[in-house]
Amino acid sequence: MDHDTASRHYRALIDDHLRAPAPESAASLFIEPFRTALVVEGAEDSAIEGMLWAAWGPVVQAARRSRAAQRDLLDLLDAIRRRAPLTRDDGDRCVIWGDQVVLTDLPCFGAQLRETWDLDETGSEQQVNLNAFAARLTAAGIDFSRYAIWTLREHLEDTTPAADLGAVLAWLGHCGPTLAQLSLRPDPPPDRGPARVGPLGRAAGVDAGGFSRTRWAFWRGRLTELARGDGAVAEQARTALRHMPPLETTT
């Protein structure tokens, strides 16, 4: 199946699934072209990768357009992940990018989401929708927590006040407890230094990137400051704080 044919197939599949959600049958229809390509056609890894890009694009775009669609999209992804790994006719599992099992590990899905991430302006409906989708994925065990770092840094650690906290609310509303647990880890990733922290965070003593107790406390403090004001941002900050407990109350 070439890229254009695959794109048409998966756009129609996602449209049909969202009109009448049936994740198990949709997962079968999603997987079957890959099975045919592997077993019947003996497709090379490069062809499988091209199909993956064509397949994930409609999923990401549907999530970008509509938050209402995201629950059904998550159910489809969960059904796909629970299926047995695809194998070639010699019994070998199909693996791309070194260790990504097709389709169990959702290979190329993260790359597709990343490619779409910066298309929209901060605060736009589409950008907030993608943040909500990444947050829902993370809460469901498909880790996009790095994207939470990007969003919280942009909105809470920059010297330019945020004009809208919708993306922050999306993360904390869908994934607050998960992010709190990440902030409690005793061994945060060592590969993100101070350059990955925004200027307000650095000024407040947040000296390492990633999640940490110090950074979580800074984010809560920043939201508390914003909540004291008037207007929509202050109201968003107050709502965000309700989804962001102090870490000492998190178990």
Image (cartoon, rainbow, N blue to C red):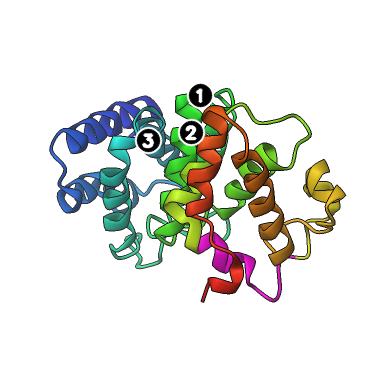
Secondary structure beneath label 3: helix
In this rendering, is residue 135 above or below 1? below
Residue labelled with disc 2: 128
Numbered mark located on residue 124 in the image: 1
Residues marked 2 and 1 touching at CB (< 8 Å): yes
Q: Position of residue 113 (x, y in %)?
A: 50, 39
In this rendering, is residue 211 above or below 16? below
Q: Earlier in the sequence, mark 1 or mark 3?
A: 3
Residue at 67% across, 51% down:
219
| Mark 1 Cα shell of 10 Å, populated few (<14), some (14-19), many (≥20) | few
Residues marked 1 and 3 touching at CB (< 8 Å): no
245 relative position to 93: left or right:
right
Numbered mark located on residue 84 in the image: none
Residue span colored magenta? 178-189
Q: Quadrant of residue 11?
A: top left
Query: Hey, what amino acid is under mark 3?
Result: Ala
Secondary structure beneath label 1: loop
Residue labelled with disc 3: 63
Count of labels in the image: 3
Quarter of the figure with the N terminus: top left
Q: Is residue 46 visible?
A: no
Residue at 34% across, 59% down:
81
Q: Position of residue 248 (x, y in %)?
A: 60, 73
Query: Hey, what amino acid is under mark 1?
Result: Ser
Q: Position of residue 36 (x, y in %)?
A: 27, 47
